[in-house]
Image: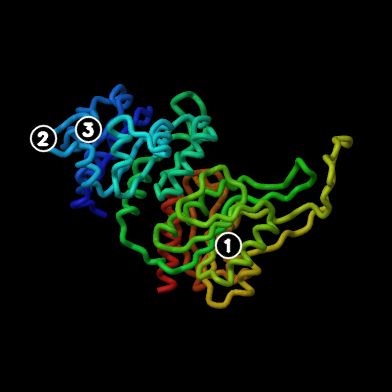
Amino acid sequence: MEFKEKTILLGVTGGIAIHKSLDYASQLVKLGASVHVVMSQNATRLINPLQFQVLSRNPVLLDLFDTGDHWKPPHIDLADRADLLSIVPATANIIGKMANGIADDALSTVAISVHCPILIAPAMNGHMLHNPSVQKNINTLRKNGIRFVNPDSGDLACGYQGEGRLSSVDVILDYTKDIFSQNKELQGKNVLVTAGATREYIDPVRFITNGSSGKMGYAIAEEAAARGANVYLVSGHTTITPPNNVKIINVDTTQEMHDSVVSLFTNTDIAIMSAAPVDYRPKEYTPHKLKKTNDTLTLDLQKTPDTAYTLGKTKTNQLTVCFAAETENVLENAKEKLIRKNCDLIIANDLLAEGAGFETDTNIVSILDRADKCEQLPLLSKREVANVILDRIMKMII
């Protein structure tokens, strides 16, 4: 997608990942956008504004009181012309200012002056990101319709490991393109997505679960919402921030997820079952903490409800998409599930493949349909996989 005749304001704050914003600015210019950079004072301590000026081919706004060459203050002039304000990287400081209406420098003043979409790509230490005040500010902005590019997990500049890394430039560009996309092909459709892991309790402190992060399902939910769908996200346990513009139903156990999905299914057009519900639960729940008195512990387990199978038996005109996470005979096992659960599509992935499976930001999947067609995808981000799945669904419902 080209951004010709689009004016994009790039807000740059003093995060250590600021170098990625140079690449982002360059990519936007190559795509035809008119890029105007607004830097915080702390950002100028990390990168010389001249670099952004050369890349963007426009002056960089640094001072709120810069009068420019016209009667209108530059920050108001830019705010009036902007088609998008994109803040890359965004520190906890600018997020807090925006959430509370504080305007004490050029960037924060521009941020409360624009009347265009806003995209924020946070980058900070993981403890800072999950600080309750920061999370409250992020949720406030989300409720106001501001879109966020969720940060990646990995090595952080401060020496920690965890969530907080600025997402890749390619992913931020994808979000940017989505905002300008007029493709609302799922407008009027009710889409039900499941995500995350469930828990089955042994006693008040112990439970059976799995390593699902929910990232795949959350990406699908966000992409479906971006395409205009009315999205219900039934979510088990995750540690990631909910996506924009979806109705989220949080659940704990597999039975709770099953009940929520079944109750919503009647009014659903498309159900995408990407959660990882636990398959077995303890036959008996112990109301008090089990004491470690023996060398071994034997648990009697029983099956939990198979929600995808239930939907396959009861569906009328709904389209159902299932997932098959396997470690051997991946395609054969996925095909068997496709038939047994009466799915329209099944997404198979090998949990042992490098870059695929739980907790990663990427995935390697194959898409199988009832006509025995198999599309094998290369290593992609989970956001990219979500788009391929939705593209495939659109071909089936048109």
**Residue 330 visible to an observer of this rendering:** no
Q: Amino acid at mark 2?
A: Asp
Residue nearest the viewer, comparing 116 with 4: 116
Where residue 95 appears, as percent x and y from the top left, is: 41, 36
Q: Quadrant of the N terminus?
A: bottom left
* Front label number (3 vs 2): 2
Where residue 338 appears, as percent x and y from the top left, is: 58, 67
At mark 2, the secondary structure is loop
Q: Amino acid at mark 1?
A: Ala
Quarter residue 348 falls in: bottom right
Q: Determine which of the numbered discs, if any, sits on residue 69 in the image.
A: 2
Query: Quick check: 145 left or right of 31?
Result: right
Q: Residue furthest right?
A: 293
**Residue 142 visible to an observer of this rendering:** yes
Residues tagged 1 and 2 counted as in contact (Cβ below 8 A):
no
Residues tagged 3 and 2 counted as in contact (Cβ below 8 A):
no
Q: Earlier in the sequence, mark 1 or mark 3?
A: 3
Rendered residue at 35%/49% (across/down):
174
Q: Amino acid at mark 3?
A: Leu
On the image, numbered disc 3 is attached to which residue? 61
Label 1 to label 3: alpha-carbon separation? 55 Å
Rendered residue at 61%/53% (across/down):
250
Residue nearest the viewer, comparing 208 with 71: 71
On the image, numbered disc 1 is attached to which residue? 334
